[in-house]
Image (cartoon, grey):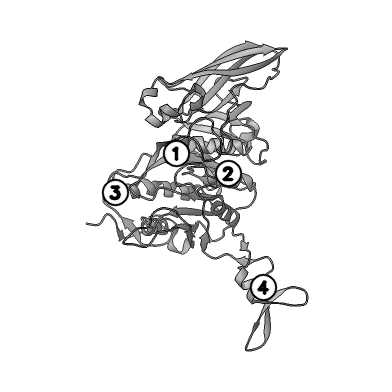
Amino acid sequence: MPDARIGPGGATGKRQSPGLWWPGRGEKSEEAGPADLIWIEHHAGSARIGDPGDARGAGGQGGDNRIVAGDNLAVMTALLPELEGQVPLIYLDPPFATGTRWARRSAIGSHRGVFDGPMVEQAAYGDVWPGGLAGYLEMLWPRLQIAYRLLAPTGTLFVHVGWQVNSYVRLLLDELFGSDRLLDEIVWHYQTSSGAPLATLIKNHATILHYAKGDAWTFNQIKEPWPEATLRKWQRDAEGRIYRVQSRFGKRYYIDPEGKRIDDVWEATLASRSHERTRYPTQKPEALLERIIRLASQPGDLVCDFFCGSGTTAAVADRLGRRWLACDRGVFAVQTTRRRLAQAGAGFEVFEAAGPVREWSVGRMPSGGPEVEVSLASEGGSWQVRLEGMWHPDRESWPEEARAACRHWHDAIEEWEVDWSYDGSVFRPGFAARRTRRDRSLALESPHVRLAPGRHLVRVWAIDFLGQAAAWEQELTA
């Protein structure tokens, strides 16, 4: 019996569209109870996007932009009281049911050049589902339903899918939105350097399904430069305007000087040596998300991505003057997004969905993890912290290439930050040192800072190349 088949639809009661049935549909749905979202970090950034209608910023809880770490079903459910019917644009890039376990390549230590130096692979996430396709659909369906509820009446949803599940996901969205709400089926074509299959064509595309919730939606026409072949073939008049002549009537047709309206086949490739690369698997190019965000939102709109991965949606939304919310349950996804936005100078908050303690949490360090040694010194009324060491109890379990690459204790550290006045709950970094792809050096001491008179709790947070975190705290009196 096939994993899934078409059956009666109309789950939402709005428009009768064919529905999709799979073994066990709805019998063992995931718990959709809301999670408690705990505010754990505040990044002021070099600039913030204001929203007069957002009371969270004025109250000191959260802010305009948020990274939320946790399972997206529980997170989306928790956001319903605040955001139901309020989000103009949601982009979802869920797994594709490929059966692949994706790995992330991490650099180790200081070295010259962008691509030189030792690397180690670590598991990032698995696209493997108990029950196969039925298990995948059972995961995705409740998340699509919550996304629909979060959308504003004029909001739109973009769902990024591969050829493996395109037809199934489209049927789910037809059932949820109505088949007449499908605005576009966008084909994203890209180049890949992977080996060519012997018995099939090279698969160099994915599909982005674009649905509207209501009868009206935001649509900003996007134009691209005319192809060089067109510009060479057509003629120019005395004023330099480009035109062609309709041969039968001799009438001139001028091209739009602003460019050609885009169609539904988009070319965008993230080169292997692009400066955008975060080494996160399945990362999408900024050009692709820029087109989506420009097409379907206005400056100041909220853009949500609940499978945020490497953080491309948040990075582009921030650059284009949109507010954003990024969510993922993966340790590397959260850390990659956090680092990417911090390096871009974005202002944002980090929230943690209550549940099992995770190793990236700045609020609660797991037992048995790495330990960091820090010295604190005063000179002329100003203060400085210096990293003195980092020890890993599980070093012997590291991959052999990682142990060989870490010749010094600080080679394992990817970034560290200092909160000079930690309040015990929300970490506010006042200094950060991070390795980047182009600069693998790492400062081991902070600049001297002058603190306000009184008692301060200094907290230092360090992250290694494995994504493990270590914290250190000490009180001082300035």
**Residue beneath the point at 27% across and 46% down:** 131
**Residue beneath the point at 54% across and 54% down:** 288
Residue at which label 3 appears? 132
- Label 3 vs 4, first from the N-terminus: 3
What kind of element bears circle 1? strand
Residue at which label 2 appears? 315
Cα gap from disc 2 to disc 1, whole angstroms:
21 Å
Asked if the residues shown at circle 2 and circle 4 are in contact, with their CB atoms under 8 angstroms apart, the answer is: no
Residue situated furthest left in the rendering: 1
In the rendered image, residue 88, in percent from the top left (x then y), is placed at: 56, 51
Q: Disc 1 residue type?
A: Arg
Asked if the residues shown at circle 3 and circle 4 are in contact, with their CB atoms under 8 angstroms apart, the answer is: no
Cα gap from disc 2 to disc 3, whole angstroms:
33 Å
Residue at which label 1 appears? 105
> Which residue is nearer to you in this view: 71 or 216?
71
- Label 2 vs 1, first from the N-terminus: 1
Quadrant where the image shows the N terminus: bottom left
**Residue beneath the point at 42% across and 54% down:** 161
What kind of element bears circle 4? loop
Cα gap from disc 2 to disc 4, whole angstroms:
34 Å
In the rendered image, residue 361, in percent from the top left (x then y), is placed at: 48, 27
- Label 2 vs 3, first from the N-terminus: 3
Q: Disc 4 residue type?
A: Ile
- Circle nearer the viewer, 1 or 3: 1
Label 2 crowd (10 A; few <14 / some 14-19 / many >=20): many
What kind of element bears circle 2? helix
Residue at which label 4 appears? 255
Cα gap from disc 3 to disc 4, whole angstroms:
51 Å
Up the image or down, 219 lies above or below 90; here it is: below
